[in-house]
Amino acid sequence: MKVILFGASGMVGQGALRELLLDPDVSAVLSVGRSASGQRHPKLKELVQEDVGDLQMLEQELRGYDACLFCLGVSALGMSEPDYKRVTYDLTLKIAQTLERLNPKITFVYVSGGGTDSTERGGVMWARVKGATENALLSMPFERAYMLRPGFIRPLHGAASKTRSYRLLHALAGPVYPAVKRLFPGRVTTTEELGRAMLQLLKRGFGERVLENRDIATLASGAALQA
């Protein structure tokens, strides 16, 4: 299986890349992003450019892949809705349309977030934009497309957020994470679980196209049992 990964330098992307490189069923990984992941591996190739939405020069590199894990994203903190929509909805759809055209049988996995608003009419800006992005992706002619809605994500194995406030939150939450996991098992996950769940989607699919945090945990636990 050959996989394209967008956003490998971000926290979620770091977790996804680790699982891809560890999995023997994955023969090649193409990482596309604004900055390098810092990883070195025989089956990893990286394409780094400031404008990740400008794929015209990269089209030959993007052909022949079985799946795409889209982990690229930004925090909505301090952003206006038009700006957030431009880097969330517009960019994601532009990339997705290019990949579907080049690889008609590709599986597309989009990391959204818990609380995403599928109605697109709620009062939370980021949730509306994420909901619109999910809906647009689900309407595209992908052979398979999945939207993942993780809750609170604990970084593992050296993964770290690029957002300072998130890094502080993760540091503070680390000691109490086991207790939170026991109390709210359906609302928290880890970068490892999320990466494993994405791989399970690529290999075996899932009955639902929109996966909440509990679905992610179910997929990840199945992967752990098979490991």
Image: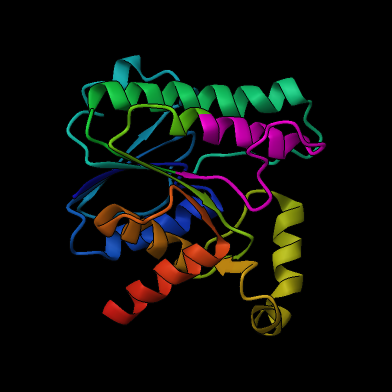
Relative image position of residue 69 (x, y in whole percent) = 39, 45
Report the colour scheme. Answer: rainbow
Whether 182 is drawn above or below 87: the answer is: below
Which corner quadrant of the image does residue 172 belong to? Answer: bottom right
**Can you say which quadrant of the picture contains the C terminus?**
bottom left
Q: Residue sitting at 70 percent across and 85 percent down?
A: 179
Which corner quadrant of the image does residue 131 belong to? Answer: top right
Q: Residue sitting at 60 percent across and 30 percent down?
A: 132
Relative image position of residue 6 (x, y in whole percent) = 42, 39
Residue 221, visible in the rendered structure = yes
User: Along the horizontal axis of the image, is 199 left or right of 158?
Assistant: left
User: Along the horizontal axis of the image, is 66 left or right of 73?
Assistant: left
Whether 20 is drawn above or below 3: the answer is: below
Q: Residue sitting at 65 percent across and 67 percent down?
A: 187
The verdict on residue 130 being magenta is yes
Residue placed furthest toward the top: 56
Which corner quadrant of the image does residue 2 belong to? Answer: top left
Relative image position of residue 202 (x, y in whole percent) = 29, 52
Q: What stretch is highlighted in magenta?
A: 110-135
Residue 227, visible in the rendered structure = no
